[in-house]
Every structure is written in structure tokens, then in C-alpha cells.
Image (cartoon, rainbow, N blue to C red):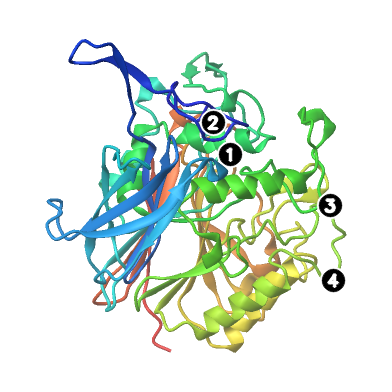
Amino acid sequence: MHGLARRTLLRGGALGLVAVPALAACASGEGPTLVRARPTLTHGVAVGDPRADGALIWARADRPATLIVETAATESFTDARRFTGPLLTPDSDGTGRLRVNGLPSGQQIHYRVTLEGDDGAASEPVTGVFRTAPAAPADIKLHWSGDVVGQGYGINPDLGGMRIFATMAGRDPHLFLHSGDSIYADGPLQESVTLPDGRVWRNVVSEAKSAVAQTLDQFRGNYAYNLTDQNYLRFNSSVAQVAQWDDHETTNNWYPGGTVAASKGYTERSMDVLSTRSWQAFHEWMPVEPTEAVDGKIYRKISYGPLLDVFVLDMRTYKDTNDADNGPTGRIFGPAQTRWLIDGLRDSKATWKIVANDLPLGVVVPDGDTAQEGPANGDPGAPRGRETEIAQVLSAIKADRVRGVVWLTADVHYTAAHHYSPERAAFTDFDEFWEFVSGPLNAGAFGPNKLDATFGPEAVFVHAPPEQNSSPLDAFQHFGEVRIDGKTAELTVDLCDASGSVLFSKRLPPSTR
């Protein structure tokens, strides 16, 4: 029931249209009277896609209510600005977002969210902070990772929940790039998991996480489950997110036109049907506004001052089938997104251009015995299939003399630093670059995978478990941290474990060419 109060009636699994009022005795002793309950913020608040003058604020109501956001320079909320948002209704499962704007650039903003019922009754407030993007060069700290509640590893009460979010929040990043697999819609949870060495992993469980997600309400319930973790809630309220999706928001290794294997136990096996429901739940429950994406879905650019542009990719919606013939052409971005990325990188004036790719470029990620999930096909020769679009982008970066491009990804459940060079590659029409891998946040750890030599990757650093599907107890959960120095424009990437220990660090100077 997504954490809804018992007094709220559900229709079709969405937010109840009718609230059952509580009874209370009249002070005069004349008998009971109806007491209208106040609306409630059920799953905290979140911030997304910041700009120089504001950001998106997300919340969810337990009944129809209007979203109200106040912003101020201090937590006392002196001289607060008030923004009135949409009416949150059952149509969106009670969720909604509001872009606050007109705020000063490069500042910490305190915000306070309340709900207002049709009778004027207000909810208890929930507060948070975020930073607007700077208008001038300034220090920037960005975190990235992916993979939440995967492989049967959910919220473990013995550990105090998903503590990695508390670790990241404690480092006070300006941005969090959520690189996908924000839920595992195909990953039901059990109350306990006995590990190979006899240890027991315990899970908080919910109805929605008891089976694979097929209905819209089940997809919604996966997001709701994650937001019962107090660490995640606090993180969401204080760090602006840039969210993208991968495969497990729908089902493992999904692609357009695909069919879920009969052995998976799905009654709805069309990946197109499942992804449509997944798309709706993702945009309801994550702090992202689809109308602000180029295609009305996922891919978009987030400008964060003169030192940083983030290009958020969608490598799921437009790719060809995983078992497609590895021919002379292929799709991983699709023609429109490919052109958008080439043009956007060429036109960017930012010192650093981070490309958020939800699938790694040169890591071979099999889908069964013969199919491939990502761009790399395992053939070390010239680009073929999906690699042709990667080659097109890399060649354009070189031809357009674009500098400062760094690729950040997750997906493969280990952390690594990959250096790509034409000197090692079968395809040579590109400039050398770095791709950094991080994850998982709270899921089984895997890897390392083989590298495809087409673009000349070298694994300069890898931190992966000795046993596949290692639990989060085994210290192979990861996030990455990017720091840009406001004075020197130097970029530093740290690959960290869940405790915040730095496993690997790479400093990159700004281009002088």
C-alpha cells in the first residue's frame, strides 16, 4: 500500500479518493463529531535537476492536497518565498513536483514543504536543503552510483538500513547522479537470505516487493519501499539528484520489442508493456520532470555553472534488440539522441563535460550465451552493431576539438577506472578519455567483466568481489566522488567504498588546448 495510512481507502492501488474521518468526543459531551484528518507527506521530500535559479521539489501526499514549497536563505525561514504547486491526486499516486525558481545562484537554499487540503488544513512540514548552480567558477562536488535493493538484498534492519546513503550525505555533495537501477522491479525480497558461509541477511519486506512488478501499482510500490529507509529519506532531502534509468526499473536486460522469458514467472511478458508502466512510475516517484527532457522521457543536459555540464543519456529506450545481428550498423542511443549528444558536447562552453552513460562503453555485459546488453560485443575488431554509434560520437568529439569529456557509469556492480586510448584500439579516430564505473549502492556485487578492445580500454583500477553476487556485508558496495576545484578547474575522481574510504583517485587537469 506504499506506506499509506490505514484510514486511507485505495482504489485500483492508487491514492485513496475518500478518507475515513476519525471520531472524537465533543468537549461539551453532546456526542461524537467528525474530525477531519490533516494531509500527510508519506515519503519525505526530494530535490532534482538544479539550475542556477532553483530546482525541482518532489513530494507525495496520502490524500488529495496542494503542494506548497517555501524557500529561504536560513533555516529560520525569515523572509521566506512561497510557491504553490499542483494538486496531488490519485492519478499520479499522490506524487508531484514543483520547480522553484528566481532564487540566487550558487547558494545553499533551505526549503520547507507542506500539503494543504481543500479545507485549508495543512500537513506537518518537512524541510531540506539544496544548492543552486553557480553562475561563476566555484568548487563542485558530485557523487554517482547505481543499483538499489538488488539481488534480494533490501533494507537490513540489523545494519540500520542502507547506510551508504548516510555516508554520502555526510560528505555533503552538491549533486548526486543516480546512474540507474534505482529499483529492482524484477527482484522480490524474502525476509531472510542465508549466505553461502552461513551468515543471514535480513530484509524489511513489503507487499509490493513480494513478487516481480508487472502492474503499475507494483512498480510504484518498489519506489515506495526504498523510501522507507531513513538514510535514503535524509539523503533525498539534502542532495539534489540527477536521475536516469537502466534496466531493472523495468525488468532485467530489457529492450524495445523484447519478451520476458517464460521461465521468469511473468504473466505480462511484453517488455514494451512493462516499460510503459515502469516509465510512469519512474516519473511519478523520482525528482525529474519529463517535459524538461529532450524527448519527454530521460535524456537531457544539466548545466551546473561554467565548470560543468552533465549529459544524461538513455541507453535503454532506443537501442536495438540484445540478440541483434552484429552488423555494420546498430543502435544504442538512436539517431536523434546521437545527434543531440554530438551537438551538445560541441556547443558546451563548460570546462568539464560529464557524460552519464547508464551502460559502460567497453565492458562486455552478456545477456545469456550469445546476446549482449551493452554496446560492447566482445569482438575486438572494428566497430560493429551498437559500437558504431559510440564510434560516431567519439569521432565527432575529436573532429570538433571538444575537451574535458569524462564518462561516468554504473550497471556492472563493481567499481573501476578505465582509460581508453587509440594507441591500443582497433578503431583509432578518437582522443583518449576516461570512463569511471561505480556501484552497487545496495545490491549484489559482481565482476569484473571482460573488456572489448575496439576502443582500447585499459582497466587501470578494479575493485570487485572474489565471489559473484557477494552481499552488501562483504564491503564491495561503492560510490564515486567527483570534485572540481573552483580556482584551478582541476577535476579529481575518487572511487569509494560504502564507508567512504577512497580506493582509487585520479586527478585530471583542465585542457589547455
Asked if residue 140 lies left or right of residue 364, the reply is: left
User: Which residue is located at x 49 percent, y 31 percent?
Assistant: 225
* Type of amino acid at the residue the image marks with label 3: Asp
Inter-mark Cα distance, 1 to 4: 31 Å
The x and y percentages for residue 124 are 26, 37
Compared with 298, 24 (above or below) is above
| Relative depth, front residue between 17 and 363 | 17
User: Which residue is located at x 24 percent, y 11 percent?
Assistant: 30
Badge 3 or badge 2: first in the primary sequence: 3
Callout 2 touching callout 1 (CB < 8 Å): yes
Badge 4 or badge 2: first in the primary sequence: 4
Inter-mark Cα distance, 4 to 2: 38 Å
Is residue 448 shown to the viewer in this render?
Answer: no
The x and y percentages for residue 18 are 49, 30
Label number found at residue 323: 3
Badge 2 or badge 1: first in the primary sequence: 1
Give the residue at mark 2: 470
Badge 1 or badge 3: first in the primary sequence: 3
Asked if residue 415 lies left or right of residue 424, the reply is: left
Q: Secondary structure at mark 2?
A: loop
Label number found at residue 327: none
| Relative depth, front residue between 474 and 140 | 140
Give the residue at mark 4: 328
Give the residue at mark 1: 446
Q: Secondary structure at mark 1?
A: loop
Q: Quadrant of the C terminus?
A: bottom left
Compared with 468, 52 (above or below) is below
Inter-mark Cα distance, 3 to 4: 15 Å
| Relative depth, front residue between 407 and 20 | 20
Q: Secondary structure at mark 4?
A: loop
Disc 3 residue crowd, few under 14, some 14–19, many 20+, Cα 10 Å: some
